[in-house]
Amino acid sequence: EVQLVESGGGLVKSGESLRISCAASGFTFSSYVMNWVRQAPGKGLEWVSSININSRYIVYSDSVKGRFTISRDNVKNSVYLQMNNLRAEDTAVYYCTREDGEAFDVWGQGTMVTVSS
Amino acid sequence: QSVLTQPPSASGTPGQRVTISCSGSSSNIGIKDVFWYQQLPGTAPKLLIYKNNQRPSGVPDRFSGSKSGTSASLAISGLRSEDEADYYCAAWDGRLSGRLFGGGTKLTVL
């Protein structure tokens, strides 16, 4: 079964850091671009970051550029999001997604990150 | 504020056909493919339409997508109660060098 499982979310204070993870299974992880997408409570979807198969092409949304770092480990079949200098507006459910031909075709269940001010 | 503009809400009765619009610009929908995602209450989003009008396996043919110029539409025919969900359009934006989502449309089945 193709699956993405996020972990590492939690409650942190403004200015602190947190690293969330996404474990992939059921497919050849190293062949796919991976993304993080977030959703603030009661709000819509917001794309956060993308990493290509060999980590040489990485892009971020303007809202997280300079604070968040995406990375991947093709041996551990995992993708990560290191979030530094967190702000209240970063509070959201963070989804890991697989990208296939620009489509986000597989989504994890999400991990909640809450930043208290 | 999303660069891809969707109506915040839409509604219909069972069996009806409803359409949801997504308006963009020459830097996104005008030059790139459009994707649609369905998010049922309390669940993760699911890919509904890819490359403007293609359905992944398992998506009923009641769902269809189209694109013209800088706008796109999602049509749902034979509306059913289980279609009640939030629907999002998405496209790559060349000017922002990133992926954009529309603000989402909440579909209510009356």
Image: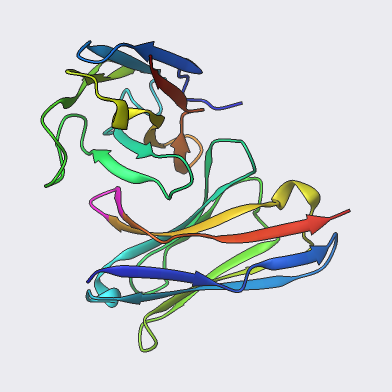
Position of residue B77 measured from the top left corner of the image (x, y, whole percent):
18, 18
Q: Is residue A59 magenta?
A: no
Q: Residue at x 51, y 18 (%)?
A: B8
Quadrant placement of the N terminus of chain A: bottom left
Residue extent of the magenta highlight: A100-105
In the rendered structure, the answer to whether residue B17 lies left or right of residue B109 reads left
Q: Residue at x 37, y 28 (%)?
A: B84
Q: Main secondary structure of the magenta part?
A: strand
Q: Is residue A101 magenta?
A: yes
Count of numbered tags:
0
The furthest residue to the right: A117
Q: Residue at x 41, y 61 (%)?
A: A108
Residue A96 vertical placement versus A43 (above, below)? below
Position of residue A51 measured from the top left corner of the image (x, y, whole percent):
43, 64
Q: Quadrant of residue B11?
A: top left
Residue B81 vertical placement versus B9 (above, below)? below
Position of residue A57 measured from the top left corner of the image (x, y, whole percent):
42, 63
Residue A85 vertical placement versus A89 (above, below)? below
Along the line of sight, the residue nearer the viewer: A107 or A47:
A107
In the rendered structure, the answer to whether residue B56 lies left or right of residue A90 reads left
Q: How is the image coloured?
A: rainbow
Position of residue B104 measured from the top left corner of the image (x, y, whole percent):
47, 28
Q: Residue at x 73, y 58 (%)?
A: A114
